[in-house]
Amino acid sequence: MPRILPQLSLVVGGSRSGKSRMAEGLVSQTGSPRHYIATAEAWDDEMRLRIAQHQADRGTDWTTWSVPRDVAAVLTQVPPGHVVLLDCATLWLTNHMLAEADIAAESQALLAALLECAAPVVVVSNEVGWGIVPENALARAFRDHQGRLNQHLAAQAGLVVGVMAGLPMVLKGAL
């Protein structure tokens, strides 16, 4: 039986924790046509390789959108009966910070677009607040913005799953 997802789901965890794989599994279990919104930009060879590996892991039966910042515009194009994976909110935030955007306004616009999308959306995001306090102001601002964004996403999501070492921990809702 196909999985029915809430309008918004959040899969959060540390780097290389298995959160993308978990989110891809949730989306695939719906049986619906799948859209992948990639926010990563290929800044260097390592990032290009990482992007290529994610693409190979997913296969070819996804509609892929490369959207570093204007995710809301893509979400309006997804038809009902489909499902969306946004991977990831962390790089989306990074891209907006590097563009010196108004992070609060952009975050509010993203949340509104996620909730207004005609299809359910699963968002992948990094948990960055468990480490040490960063030594520079930009890194501290990033950590703070990411923490607030994750809180806002989790508050609106019907399902929140933390992933550690590839294992899910349901924080809200049910798998």
Image (cartoon, helix red, strand yellow):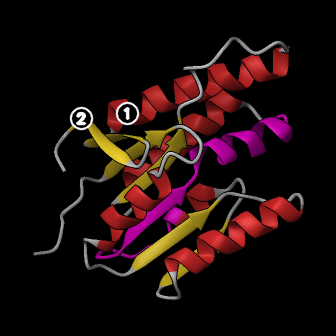
Quadrant assignment, res 119: bottom left
Q: Is residue 28 magenta?
A: no
State the image coordinates of residue 113 (x, y, percent, origin top left).
Answer: 48, 51
SS of the residue under disc 2: strand
- For marks 2 and 1, give the CA distance: 8 Å
Q: Residue drawn at (18%, 66%), measured in percent from left and top?
A: 3
Q: Residue at x 74, y 19 (%)?
A: 141
What residue did someone put label 1 on?
Answer: 154
Would residue 157 be found to the left or right of residue 131 on screen? left
Quarter of the figure with residue 39: bottom right
Q: Position of residue 139 (x, y in %)?
A: 78, 22
Which numbered marker is on residue 172?
A: 2
- Left or right: residue 99 compared with residue 14: right
Q: Give the residues drawn in magenta, as a range.
A: 75-100
Residue 119 seen in this snapshot: no
81 falls in the magenta region: yes
| Badge 2: residue crowd in 10 Å (few <14, some 14–19, many ≥20) | some
Of 77 and 39, the residue lying toward us: 39
State the residue in front, 96 or 77. Answer: 96
- Can you say whether 133 is above or below 166 in the image? above
- Residue furthest right as drawn: 44
Do tag 2 and tag 1 residues touch (Cβ < 8 Å)? yes
Q: Nearer the viewer, residue 71 or 35?
A: 35
Residue 53 locus on image (x, y percent):
65, 72
Which class describes the residues within 10 Å of circle 1: few (<14), some (14-19), or many (20+)? Answer: many
Q: Note whether 79 is above or below 16 in the view shown.
A: below
